[in-house]
Image (cartoon, grey):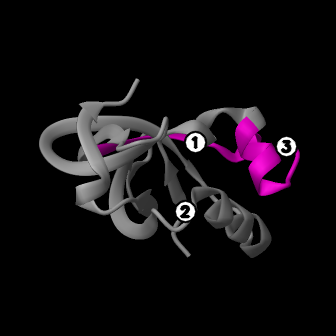
Amino acid sequence: MPPLFLYGTLLDPAVLERMAGEPGLARRLRPARLPGWARVGLRGTPYPTLLPDPGVVTEGALLRCGPGALARLAAYEGASYRLVPVRAETPRGPRRARAWVAPRWRASGQAWP
């Protein structure tokens, strides 16, 4: 199963480990970039989502986790997001991955801090 591309609140090790229920999970984060996607706000929330945008690159990290942690992270992400296939760039080359993305109509279009 491809790794997750994380780009928002789950990049914070404390948030990641608390939501996944796995102490030490943040040690598995590997730097990655997602070309062709912009990190923008999710309308009405303090959270981000991704929008396709040629010429933009979103910084983030790849994470491999087990099914238990994945289920807990999916619950944290909630029904607003779905996992979509993406192609991330890493220091070792391109990698298939999955990222949580909300429907386009939910995106604010404003850059997320």
Image-based side of 96 in relation to 110, left or right: right
Hey, which quadrant is residue 94 in on the image? bottom left
Q: Which residues are magenta?
A: 15-34
Q: Position of residue 62 (x, y in %)?
A: 54, 49
State the mark number for residue 65: none
Image-based side of 112 in relation to 51, left or right: right
Image-based side of 9 in relation to 47, left or right: right
First in sequence: mark 1 or mark 3?
3
Secondary structure beneath label 1:
strand
Q: Position of residue 104 (x, y in %)?
A: 24, 58
Residue displayed at 85% across by 43% down: 24
Task: Give the residue type that dot 2 points to.
Answer: Pro
Query: Is residue 25 visible to the viewer in this orientation of the structure?
Result: no
Position of the C terminus by quadrant: top left
Query: Is residue 95 visible to the viewer in this orientation of the structure?
Result: yes
Q: How many marks?
A: 3
In contact (CB < 8 Å): disc 1 and disc 2: yes
Alpha-carbon span between mark 1 and mark 3: 14 Å
Secondary structure beneath label 3:
loop
| Most distant residue in the right direction | 23
Q: Which residue is mark 1?
A: 30
